[in-house]
Amino acid sequence: LSFFPVVVGMVKGLKSPEQLEVDLMKTWSASKAQVLFKLRAPKSTPYLFTSLKLGMAASVVGAIVGELPSGGGGGLGFRMLSGSTFGNTLHIWSGLFSAAILAGSLISIIIIIERVVLKRMALET
């Protein structure tokens, strides 16, 4: 559920350098590995973090949906399912808000890491 958004984002990021930049690297006799590590990888970093944020949100949803048919345990999916079964809307809303807080917290961690990495790479001021 979260693998494909990250892969698609990375492929798009690795293809993001303009042909002029690639030609310039070839003019400097850069090998394919040098083009990858010195041009394509740094250019794909913003795409990586964007796709990681999408993948993180999808993984939280996937974990909750994956818990639903299991029927046992104390996860958020089980809490929402038992709330809907027994008509307890408090369980449903608490599960939804907990999932939103969890996803927001995980995405915030990715945003902090993104800012640190991009600042170190001098891609963001």
Image (cartoon, helix red, strand yellow):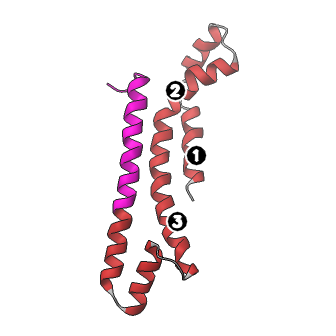
Three-letter code, disc 3? Gly
Foreground: 85 or 43?
Answer: 85
Mark 1 / mark 3, whichever is N-terminal: 1
> Can you identify the residue that label 2 sits on?
42
Side of 70 where 92 appears, left or right = left
Real-space CA distance between mark 1 and mark 3, rounded to the nearest whole angstrom: 18 Å
Real-space CA distance between mark 2 and mark 3, rounded to the nearest whole angstrom: 30 Å
Mark 2 / mark 3, whichever is N-terminal: 2
Foreground: 45 or 79?
Answer: 79
Please state the horizontal and vertical placement of residue 35, each as a whole percent of the image: 62, 20
Indicate yes or no whether the magenta region holds residue 89. no
Three-letter code, disc 2? Pro
Q: Which residues are magenta?
A: 101-125
Real-space CA distance between mark 1 and mark 2, rounded to the nearest whole angstrom: 16 Å
At mark 3, the secondary structure is: helix
Q: Nearer the viewer, mark 1 or mark 2?
A: 2
**Residue placed at 60% from the left, 13% from the top?**
25
Please state the horizontal and vertical placement of residue 82, each as a whole percent of the image: 43, 85
Foreground: 27 or 73?
Answer: 73
> Can you identify the residue that label 1 sits on?
8
Work out whether 120 lies above or below 73: above
Three-letter code, disc 1? Val
